[in-house]
Amino acid sequence: MTPLTSVRARDLMRSQVVTLSPDASIREAVETLQDDHLGGVPVVDESETVVGFLSLADIARIEHLQGDRLAEARGDRQLSNPIGEALEEESLDDEEFAGREDYSPELLGRETVGQWMTRGVVAIAPDAPLKEVCATMVRESVHRLVVLERGRLAGIISTMDIVRHLATHA
């Protein structure tokens, strides 16, 4: 049994990482996530540089899953304020608009992973200790960390990887 203080990101990470291209379609991304039972994947360009991250949460903001098919959010959306009065969409700034419970955006012609991915990737070094891995996940409110070594994708760590490690080694 190894002490938890000696556990490093490289001990937790999966080095076989499913990735997507920014040019991949959203449909292809959903199929990949479903087929591989993943909640999100790094997005890499042709030089294998991590340029973003696409998660199911990103996709949920743009489309609705209906059965095993994707369908664009359709229909007129009318936002209401807390007292039930209709609001004009133009009166809301982007942040307030996106934060509304009854907001569901349409695709608006955006069909590629690159158009919907999160550009700010939360990454960690392979030698980072377990405590830093966990603290980073908590601080950034994420369930997955990209592991970068010399700027290149070395692996990925999810909360499940940490739980799995603790269950088998603690």
Image: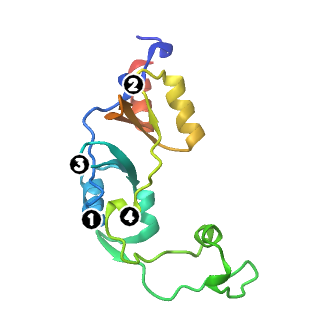
Residues 128 and 119: in front is 119
Q: Mark 3: which amino acid? A: Glu
Mark 3–mark 4 distance (CA, rounded to whole Å): 16 Å
**Which of the two discs, 1 and 3, sits closer to the camera?**
3
Residue bearing the label numbered 4: 115
For this rendering, which residue is in front, 39 or 119?
119
Residue for point 30% across, 57% down:
22
Type of the residue with mark 1: Ser
Pointer 2 residue? 126
Residue at x 47%, y 43% (from the top left corner): 143
Residue 72 vs residue 164, the one in the foreground:
72
| Left or right position of 51 against 36 | right
Q: Mark 4 Cα within 10 Å, few/some/many (few <14, many 20+)?
A: some
What amino acid is found at the position of numbered circle 4 in the picture? Answer: Gln
Label 1, on which residue?
25
Q: Which amino acid does label 2 sit on?
A: Pro
